[in-house]
Image (tube, rainbow, N blue to C red):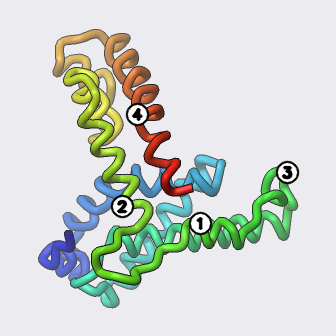
Amino acid sequence: MIDEIFNKKLKKGEPKAYNILFKEFYPRLFGYCRLFVKDNYKSEDLVQECFEDLWNNKNNININKSVGSLLFVSLKNKCLNHLKKEKKIYNIKGVEDININELEHLYQIDFLEKEEITLEEQLYKDLEEAIKKLPEKRKIVFTKCKIQGIKQKEVAKELNISIKAVEKHIASAKKQLKELLKISLLFFF
């Protein structure tokens, strides 16, 4: 759902709004970027560039459109441009095997109808549903550490469990989510 009030704050350049936006979208954008770019540092740079571009062009924000979708489209384009550049300049092993046109087609975000949602939004919904299926303690630990970004040590203290238990919950959650999301991904590819 589009939050016009929030988008107005972004358009005005309110730092709190950008902080909230960053915290909400950075993990998803970084994960999405890693589908294209296998280097963590370059992925971080590309995601950061998207936020910088949004800030620099804040006057052009349409308050009636999803800023999240705008960020994903921007990132997709940055990733594809990066891959094209890498392929052209370095001809890196693995990059030369990527058919850029196929990737562009696969991750193309079209808004043919208002009811349609982007691939990223659908995957995010599927992830949310999969997280709901986790056992309660595992869900809490995973959400706090991986979604909210709270340090494992803090989560262990808050839940009165060991750091090892936190690590085991996260590992188990990742394994379970991977299995649950495989089914979802089959429908897209």
Q: Residue at x 85, y 67 (%)?
A: 89
Earlier residue among tags 4 and 3: 3
Q: Where the N terminus falls, by quadrant?
A: bottom left
Q: Residue at x 31, y 85 (%)?
A: 61
Q: Position of residue 78 (x, y in %)?
A: 58, 70
Label disc, if present, on residue 106 of the rendered structure: 1
Local SS, label 1 = helix
Earlier residue among tags 3 and 1: 3
Asked where in the image residue 140 lies, by quadrant, the reply is: top left
Give the CA distance from mark 1 to mark 2: 15 Å
Residue type at mark 4? Leu
Residue type at mark 2? Glu
For discs 3 and 2, the disc positioned in front in the rendered view:
2
- Which residue carries the number 3 mark? 93
Q: Residue at x 45, y 26 (%)?
A: 175
Give the CA distance from mark 3 to mark 1: 22 Å
Local SS, label 3 = loop
Earlier residue among tags 3 and 2: 3
Residue type at mark 3? Lys
- Which residue carries the number 4 mark? 177
As drawn, 59 above or below 135: below
- The answer to the question of whether label 1 and label 4 lie on touching residues, with beta carbons closer than 8 A, is no
Which residue is more in the foreground, 157 or 133? Answer: 133
Earlier residue among tags 1 and 4: 1
Q: Position of residue 178 (x, y in %)?
A: 47, 34
Earlier residue among tags 2 and 4: 2
